Structure formats: structure tokens, C-alpha cells
Amino acid sequence: MTKEEFKAEYTKKGWTATTLAKRWGYTAATRIHHIAVDPHKNPYMIDAVRGLPYIIKEKI
């Protein structure tokens, strides 16, 4: 999975690198970017990003 595909997977579900970092227990969004660009990322990271729930934003 390329970095573009990785980012597209979480952004289409309403996530940002910052919110995803918080969800996964990282202190900075930088870690999400490092995972995205890693050509040898662990398969469980690909499974994790594909399994993210959609974030529903309500308009008030």
C-alpha cells in the first residue's frame, strides 16, 4: 500500500493524521506519516487503517 493509498483510506472515512494518532495512542501525527511512507509497513497497519470506522460529523 502506497502512502497515497494509506492516506486516502483514512481520509475517506473522515480521519486526519492527528485524530488517527490519538486513536492509535501516538503522541504526534508525525508517526502516522512515518507509517504511511514506510514501504515495508507491517500488514497489521494496513488492516488497521482499512478497518477504521467512519467518523460522522453532524452539522449544527
Image: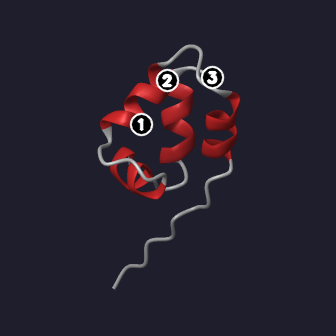
Q: How many marks?
A: 3
Dot 3 amino acid type: Met
Q: Nearer the viewer, mark 3 or mark 1?
A: 1
Mark 3 burial class by Cα count in 10 Å: few <14, some 14-19, many 20+: some
- Residue furthest toward the top? 39
Q: Which residue is mark 3?
A: 1
Q: What's the distance in space between the residues labelled 3 and 2, CA to CA?
A: 7 Å
Q: Quadrant of residue 31?
A: top left
Mark 1 burial class by Cα count in 10 Å: few <14, some 14-19, many 20+: some
Q: What's the distance in space between the residues labelled 2 and 1, CA to CA?
A: 10 Å
- State whether residue 16 is above or below residue 59: above
- Residue depicted at x 37% and y 79%: 59
- Residue depicted at x 48% and y 52%: 24
- State whether residue 27 is above or below residue 32: below
Q: In the drawing, does residue 1 fall left or right of residue 57?
A: right
Q: Quadrant of residue 41?
A: top right
Q: Which mark is residue 24?
A: none
Dot 2 amino acid type: Lys
Q: Which residue is mark 2?
A: 3
- State whether residue 48 is above or below residue 36: below
Q: Which mark is residue 32?
A: 1
Secondary structure category for the residue under label 1: helix
Residue 58 picture location, percent across and down = 43, 78
Residue 38 picture location, percent across and down = 50, 18
**Pointer 3 or 1: first along the chain:** 3
Q: What's the distance in space between the residues labelled 3 and 1, CA to CA?
A: 14 Å
Dot 1 amino acid type: Ile
**Pointer 2 or 1: first along the chain:** 2
Quadrant where the image shows the C terminus = bottom left
